[in-house]
Image: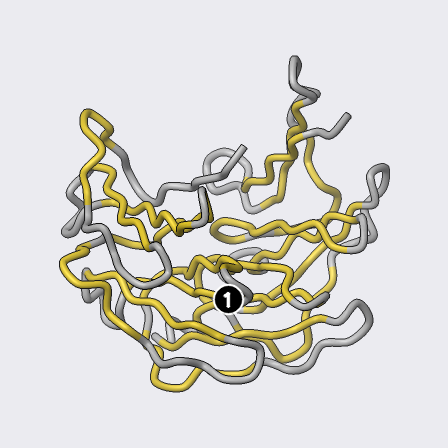
Amino acid sequence: MSNIYVFHEGRGDNGWLWSNAFDGSEWAGDQKIPNTGITAGPSAVVYNDQIYVFHQGMEDSGWLWYNVFDGSEWAGDQKVPDTGISEGPSAVVYNDQIYVFHQGRGDSGWLWYNVFDGSEWAGDTEVKRTGMTAGPSAVVYNGQIYVFHQGRGDSGWLWYNVFDGSEWAGDTEVKRTGMTSSPSAVVYNDQIYVFHQGRGDSGWLWYNVFDGSEWAGDTEVKRTGLTDDPDAVVM
């Protein structure tokens, strides 16, 4: 039977990666991952039957790191070569490779990504003309990668860019969709749902839905207050 693994930084900004596992009825108990320092939120994917957990290094190091879990042991935290980062990353598996998206180092305000084929990293690459704030959220939809983010300079608006495996479509603003900090996107019923806090630290949860051609319009989730970023998953 499968388990749900939840990865997070320890309480009180303690700077270490922790995980808890749920088997459908009970939680195993929170455990510290050995020698894995972290800043901001991690991003985990399953690849080649192992869990890869990506994160910024400890104490705002500004570099991308990852650790790999085979179901019983951790391989040990490794630095991704020459991949500077701000905030937390967003990783997806696409075309049998891992794509890790992130804001550039030192709050650069631009979207970057690196690709891992199971043995080597391709090298960090800037996505041209794609300015951003905080962290991105990437999903695979209709054979393409959609990367959602807040616009550059704390713009307060949701933007996204689409990658087809060879080219980027160009960054596009989602009309009338104000937001704070970072979004969280999931694919559900053949549509993309993007959750976010309302504009100007509103303290309320909102979402917009994309069917592949049109957006439904931003909608407030009634009586659902929040602080900081949401995180959505499909079960």
Q: Quadrant of the N terminus?
A: top right
Tell me where residue 193 appears, x and y as whole percent.
Answer: 36, 47
Between 146 and 155, the one lying in front of the other is 146
Determine whether, in the image, residue 107 is placed left or right of residue 221.
right
Determine whether, in the image, residue 27 is placed left or right of residue 208.
right
Tell me where residue 32 appears, x and y as whole percent.
Answer: 68, 36
Q: Is residue 128 above or below residue 62?
A: below
Residue type marked 1: Ile
Per the image, the residue denoted by label 1 is 145
Question: Dividing the picture into quarters, in which one does residue 7 lie?
Answer: top right
Question: Dividing the picture into quarters, in which one does residue 56 lie?
Answer: bottom right
Q: Quadrant of the C terminus?
A: top right
Between 206 and 43, the one lying in front of the other is 206
Tag 1: Cα neighbours inside 10 Å, few (<14), some, or many (≥20)? many
Question: Dividing the picture into quarters, in which one does residue 223 lie?
Answer: top left
Between 91 and 166, the one lying in front of the other is 166
Between 46 and 192, the one lying in front of the other is 192
Q: How many marks?
A: 1
The residue depicted at 49 percent of the width and 49 percent of the height is 41
